[in-house]
Image (spheres, helix red, strand yellow):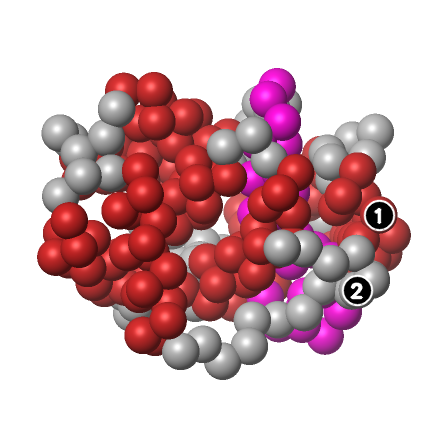
Amino acid sequence: MFERSSKTAVAPADHDPIQERARFVALWERRLSGGRALAETMHARLIELYGEPHRRYHTLDHVRHCLEEFDRAATLMDDPDAVEMALWFHDAIYRSGAMDNERCSADLFRQWSEGHADAAFLQRVDDLIMVTTHRDPPTQRDERFIVDIDLSSFGLPWEAFERDGRRIRAECADIVDEIYCPGQLRFLLSLQNRPTFFLTEFFQQRYERIAHDNIRRVIENLHARGYG
């Protein structure tokens, strides 16, 4: 299910949309009722959301990258189905600058799943989506894994990491540098100042050093531009 030999995260490869849909349908049918037709409808709606024209980083490619990292670590999780479902939905709603994207994404999952899943599973997925706000330290094993997965692109080689940074900035094109850059710096410093960047041993072993190197380079660039 996972492999420990790779030391550098890789960008998502080309994906077969049929296999991708089959994966989501299989997950839905394992944990929710409603049958294949409903699952395929839900998948199609997610694809539409992640394909919205204002998105540059928070697209299906980000979900694919997360799922690749999930596959490497799934056997270490308590409820991998809940983590995977949360990854599919965690950026389903995305509006630049909004503070409630995760809450809206979790609410969307609840709306679509109403009457098709038990309350415990719904709450687990909701909690896992909400922890990707990165505002509060996660307390559960699976919460730590989904946080690490969501931030695993910090372990990409510098060129790919920098490309992702440009895409995130493009999503916030209406925010001037004087507002965007200090906010970016605060977020990066909060990550840099944690005891460890990643919260699970699995991701620490894979990407800790690269993530710190990438963050350091961005912070140095922001300082050189007069921020902070």
**Residue kind at label 2, given as amino acid type:** Ser
Q: Residue at left 31%, top 74%?
A: 18
Does 114 sit left or right of 203 as displayed? left
Does 24 sit left or right of 149 as displayed? left
Q: Residue at left 67%, top 69%?
A: 10
The CA distance from mark 1 to mark 2 is: 10 Å
Residue marked by disc 1: 205
User: Picture coordinates of residue 102 (x, y %)?
Assistant: 38, 37
Residue marked by disc 2: 6
Q: Secondary structure at mark 1?
A: helix
User: Picture coordinates of residue 88 (x, y %)?
Assistant: 38, 50
User: Picture coordinates of residue 148 (x, y %)?
Assistant: 65, 42
Q: Which residues are magenta?
A: 139-164
**Residue kind at label 1, given as amino acid type:** Gln
Q: Residue at left 50%, top 32%?
A: 79
**Magenta stretch holds residue 141:** yes
Q: Secondary structure at mark 2?
A: loop
**Considering the image in quadrants, where does the N terminus appear?**
bottom right
Q: Earlier in the sequence, mark 1 or mark 2?
A: 2
For residue 160, say whether it is visible.
Answer: yes
For residue 212, say whether it is visible.
Answer: no
Most common SS among magenta residues: helix
